[in-house]
Image (cartoon, rainbow, N blue to C red):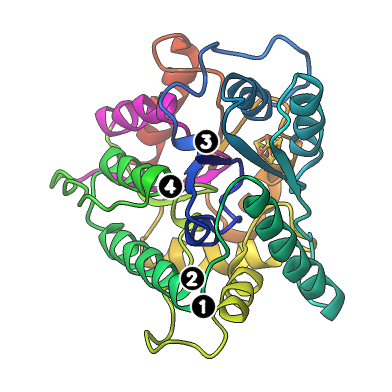
Amino acid sequence: MDVFLTSPWIPPEWVRAHGLQPRGIWAAENLQRLPCPLSAGVCAFAESAVRFAQSRAESAAVFSTACDQMRRAFDAAIFRGQRQAFLFNLPATWQTAAAGQILRSELERLGRFLLAMGGRAPSPEQLWLEMLQAGRTRKLLLESARASSSRGFAEAVARFHWDGSFSPPPPAAPADQIPLALVGGPFLASHWKWLDALEAAGGRVALDATEMGELSLAPPLESETVAKDPFDTLFRGCLDNTIGVFQRPNARLYSWLKPRLASRQARGIVLWHFTGCDLWRAEAPTLRETFGLPVLLLEACAEPGAAPRDLNRLQAFVETLR
Ligand code: SF4
């Protein structure tokens, strides 16, 4: 059975260890059949998640409480008939023992849900194997990030989130393109054409810091020697490596960005956000002030072909950085 995940912070190896197939819905090629949500103020990604879950009622869907929109999307999915849905309470803090306890018990509760969906109880050895495999693939992706084409890297990460596989992304074209950081919310298959437009304009993504890009690739396990308690290692990895705009404070996000923006020599930041996503949109002034880089806001609804105005803004942004 497919288990569709709406958040990159829910560990796919935990699902796979139960004998089920985790799939990040953001990697689905047909996630956004309609260009924009019709309901004012609703995040198009959250709305697409509801529609997608509704259309796959035979599968399971896992939502998270990372934001109010996604929390509400879970309710809407249930109202619309998706009975095999799970709401993962993702703590917005990590600093206290209570936050850790919530995360651990949510992973255990998710495990019980997966068993109810027909999964098998994972042995520690099986879980460890899945963790090793996922960790190795994340490592390969992280190692290829610097030298890959913008679109090729986005596609390779999406493939990992869809079926766990790794296919080496094509190398970046050797050119004097302006290195930029792409920071923000879900970057879907339907948005990849933005990356072609960016490269055509003379820029390139030197750092993909979208939620489903490098931000979603936790560092590999410190040791491949089988852990005494693989579940505990999984839990601690989630606690240490969940880095998101929804966390309070969101200092982890800025600590993660700082060395990477410097080492990739990013000259500007493209802040990618869905219409209705106040969480990411609100970061624009702080990103500017913290890193002293110019920030261009782009809305996910607008695609290059459909919104020449946004394409012009992107071209002008790259041009001003020359
Ligand atoms: S894009 Fe923003 S509003 Fe939409 S689900 Fe993600 S965090 Fe929530």
Sooner in the amino-acid sequence: mark 4 or mark 3: 3
Residues 124 and 161: in front is 124
Q: Amino acid at mark 2?
A: Leu
For residue 319, side relative to residue 113 (left or right): left
Residue 62: percent from left, percent from top: 65, 43
Q: Which residue is mark 3?
A: 25
Between label 1 and label 3, give the one nearer the viewer.
1
Between label 1 and label 4, give the one nearer the viewer.
1
Q: Give the vertical position of 294 relative to 141 (above or below).
A: above
Q: Amino acid at mark 4?
A: His
Q: Amino acid at mark 1?
A: Pro
Q: Which residue is mark 4?
A: 161
Secondary structure of residue under mark 2:
helix
Residue 123: percent from left, percent from top: 51, 73
Do the numbered discs 2 and 1 sit on residues whose CB atoms are within 8 Å?
yes
Q: Amino acid at mark 3?
A: Ile
Q: Which residues fall within the magenta stretch? A: 176-201
Q: Residue at x 61, y 13 (%)?
A: 36
Q: Label 1 CB, ligand 1: below 8 Å?
A: no
Secondary structure of residue under mark 3:
helix
Q: Which residue is mark 2?
A: 127
Whether residue 78 is visible to the viewer of this picture, yes or no, is yes
Sooner in the amino-acid sequence: mark 1 or mark 3: 3
